[in-house]
Image (cartoon, rainbow, N blue to C red):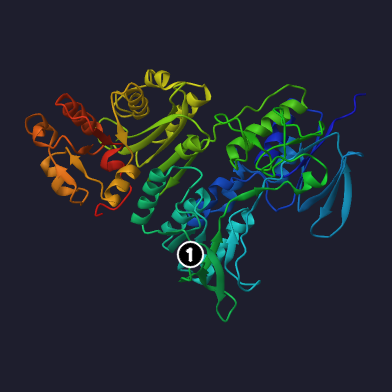
Amino acid sequence: MKQKKRVVIIGGNACGMKTAARLRRRDSDAEIMVFEKGSFISYGSCGFPYYISGAVKDYQSLIGGAGSVRDEAYFDSVKGVKVTTGREVTGIDRENKEVEVLDLSSGDSSRQSYDTLVIATGGIPSRPVIEGPDDIEGVFTVASMDDIIAIREHIDNNGVQNVIISGGGFIGVEVAEALKEKGLCVTIIKKSDKILPSLFDEEMSLLIAKHMELKGVRIIVGDAVTGMRADDKGCLKSVVTEKGEELPAGILLVTKGFLPNAGLAKAAGLELGESGAIRVNANMQTTDPDIYAGGDCVECTHLVTGKKMTLALGSLANLQGRVIADNIAGDDAVFPAVPGTAIFKIFDYTASRTGITEKEAKDLGYEYISVIVPGPDKPGFYPGAKPVVTKLIADKKTRKILGVQILGPGEAAKRMEIAATALTCNASVDMLSMLNLAYSPPYSPPMDNIINAANAVINKLKGLAEGRSPIEVMKKFKAGDDFIFLDVRTESEFSRMRIDHPKVMPMPLGKLRSEGGSLPKDKEIVVSCVSSLRAYEGCIILKAMGYEKVSFMDGGLLAWPYPLSI
């Protein structure tokens, strides 16, 4: 009689439970055991902000699926998987192929043998040193179901009005929206000079911050929370920043990101990468062929750079779990390099990105070109059309897409999925510009935004257009450069909204052919409009008239991330 394979999985969330469920479909005889340190399994952590805000009424909804709560009993009866919560695996004995398991309620330890082991221990929240009472109430991370239940209870039971969020990554931004929607006063404090620094370039990050501030979220950059003060009941009443500002706070959320939870693997002698995450091969095997690992605790390979990195994304954890299960079942499944695609909601904005940023391209030595192209997500005549701003970065030599960032109140998600697919398929901007996408006015313009962005790159590569980013233009304003900022919108558009600076000169595009010759030819001219389309036309007209020092501002006023009064 064939002996059943015993598979032990450490960690009961995305990667661990996907491995268990997929493996059961592939192998009906395997003995599958999952040990989870916490109280909950298989929950949707990406839904945490929406539970905090109250949009998700019951936290049980985050662990539901197919009409059932996915708890221990569900996996036992439906999947044939033995799941035990409240059990922490404290050691791995690779020689004897056993794990040490601690019962957190009783304190008892036991040993469990395995044929194949899967490490899916996820990430642990980064906790900066903040001075203050050790037992202060009102300080939380956003890392587990227990965290979010406690956060919502603390807010509801203590009349909290002021929230400080330490950290401006996407978790901090999502939670800021959730708490603002709940009617609280929210402040983000970020040590770096912008929010979302690893995901977006400066102008895109500034556009997101501008939108959040319009919605009432205060954003402080270049500072950090360094201290806490309590009231006479031991509850948080204020925080102190590195620069000495004291801010009222009924709750402090520390969202400084996650570190790979790789301590168990390290103690077992498994190899870690430079990031501190577990090193795995393309089959998701560690340096011990009988031990697999996946999720936030492992390294991935970046599709564009080829470098190792960590990515805390539930989507990747599920994909990796499937690969692990298939390989345990006898396949030769491979988890490929990934472009690092991410998307999240910020009030009525969507922010998304894939590939690398312009800053990363520069740091890595790429000879690149970038464009910023705003436009409506549907034809202007169709009701409900809303703008999206697309930034596309491409390699000048190969013309391959390096990265894309898309944000705005319009439909950004489907454009980002097009971009991520094109990048994954190693497409050039030429291929992207000729995609036969589905077109109908309720869904998109005839020339979709992502295609327009590709065409803008091609125009620059051919020398047909020269653009300046909003950051470059602002630097010219601040430096007092001798140039003309030519606004070619109509007179009514200019009177309603404009950049307020002495170097700004209005001249509608319709008058440029007749009146443009009055402009001095010895000065640099930067042309602008709403989205840069008319500005591009203006550059062509001026160059035909003999003007040489002419460029346009990428993205126009729709992509201007600064105050209008300079």
Please name the residue that numbered disc 1 is placed on.
163
| Occupied quadrant, residue 385 | top left
Q: Which residue: 57% across, 54% down?
A: 256
Q: Evaluate whether residue 376 shows in this view.
A: no
Outermost residue toward the front in this view = 522
Question: How many badges with numbers are in the image?
Answer: 1
Q: Is residue 474 above or below residue 528?
A: below
Q: Evaluate whether residue 493 shows in this view.
A: yes
Question: Badge 1: few (under 14), some or many (20 or more) residues near its Cα, within 10 Å?
Answer: many
If the image is split into quadrants, where does the C terminus sit?
A: bottom left
**Residue 79: where, in percent of width, then height?**
72, 35
Closer to the camera in the image, 146 or 303? 303
SS for callout 1: strand
Q: Is residue 186 above or below residue 369?
A: below
Q: Which residue: 82% across, 55% down?
A: 103
| Occupied quadrant, residue 317 | top right
106 relative to 517 in the view: left or right? right
Q: Is residue 541 above or below residue 219?
A: above
**Residue 407: where, in percent of width, then height?**
39, 40
**Residue 355: where, in percent of width, then height?**
50, 33
Outermost residue toward the left in this view = 514
If the image is split into quadrants, where does the N terminus sit?
A: top right
Q: Which residue: 14% across, 26% down?
A: 545
**Residue 341: where, in percent of width, then height?**
52, 35
Closer to the camera in the image, 379 or 401? 401
Hey, what amino acid is under mark 1? Val
Closer to the camera in the image, 385 or 132? 132
128 relative to 429 in the view: left or right? right
478 relative to 233 in the view: left or right? left
157 relative to 475 in the view: left or right? right
